[in-house]
Amino acid sequence: MNTFFPNRDIVFQLGVSYTGSTDEIGFINADGSDLHYFQIPFKESVSIQTPVWTDDGGLLFFGAPNTVVTALIEKDYPLTLKLRNKWTYQPSLIHGTHEILLNSVLDEFTSAILREDYFSAEILETYPMDQSISRIYLGANNFVKQQLLYSQLIKEDNNIYRYELVILDTNTNQISILLSYSGIPQEVTRILNPAFSPSGEWIAYTSNDGIYLIRPDGSEIQRIVQMKNMRQFWTSAASWSPDGKSIVYHYCTKDGWDCEGDTERENNIIYRYDLETKEERVLVVGGVNPYWRWDTTE
């Protein structure tokens, strides 16, 4: 990859707080070698959150001056910062394209998922959600362009929450609900940040007690990573390796509710999990939201 940024496999976020601002990000190889901290050379203050490698070596992220936006830093020097005034929890890249998925709000009552060209900022498609949906969660990686993968939160009567794992076929507009859990907010089983594996054969998602895998037809659900506490400031999200054999993610190491408001870097650790050996190893102490690089350029 010919890029201005350090030539590493994984990029990750250093700042943990929404209100804290950092123009520094981290890079590391998948085997844990060559850790490098990198300061973005912009004159203005830039808060970099959930950095994402683009296929050609640029970076997408959200959180920028004065407002929360999606931004693009192209790979070549001098670096240029392109701001997109569209809010999202995390840019969800469709690999093999110049497209991302974003959370958005169409009006006071209707949310949507937008598919956008991240170079031109052109909206390629808008997928409005039902007005009963309170929140939409996108995962780190997307590989199956014709299938829109997300999870949704619905607030029902009597203080009941319902989480659903959803695939929308963009060719037929058919919706398939793979999983659905209901309960009071403190106890409901959550479904967050779903992401397709590179082959499209598996979906990884985050729940109350770890990271799970499920088939796109809703079968073979299994927990692969156990976590003692998922109520943390940044929710863990799995990012797949290009060969589909590993994932990277972070979680807070504190006990109980202490992680929910914790913004200390040293309490958040980035891990790699090997799906074949079932080995979990520490990559970085002090970082969140790792994202695996996909280089589709020559």
Image: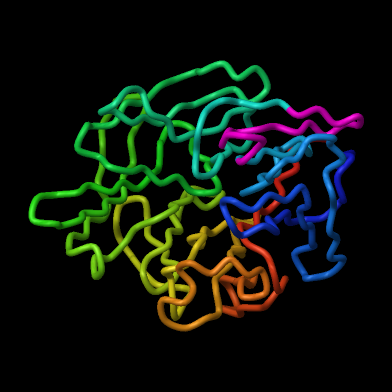
The image quarter containing residue 189 is bottom left
Range covered by the magenta-colored residues? 63-81
Residue drawn at x 64%, y 57% is 241
| Outermost bottom residue | 255
Q: Residue at x 84, y 65 (%)?
A: 35
Residue 74 is left or right of residue 64, and the answer is: right
Residue 114, image quadrant? top left
Residue positioned 39% across, 74% down in the render: 209
Residue 286 appears left or right of 158: right
Assign the C terminus to one quadrant of the image: top right
Q: Position of residue 25 (x, y in %)?
A: 76, 53
**Extreme left residue here?**
158
Q: Look at the picture and state if 13 lies above or below 121.
A: below
Q: Quadrant of the N terminus?
A: top right
In magenta segment, residue 268:
no
Location of residue 162 in the rendering, given as x and y in whole percent from the top left corner: 21, 54
What's the magenta bit mostly, secondary-structure-wise?
Answer: loop
| In the rendered image, the vertical position of residue 60 relative to residue 51, given as above or below | above
Task: Report the side of 277 relative to 14 (left or right).
Answer: left
Magenta span has 75? yes
Percent x, y of residue 69: 58, 33
The residue at 58%/64% (across/down) is 249
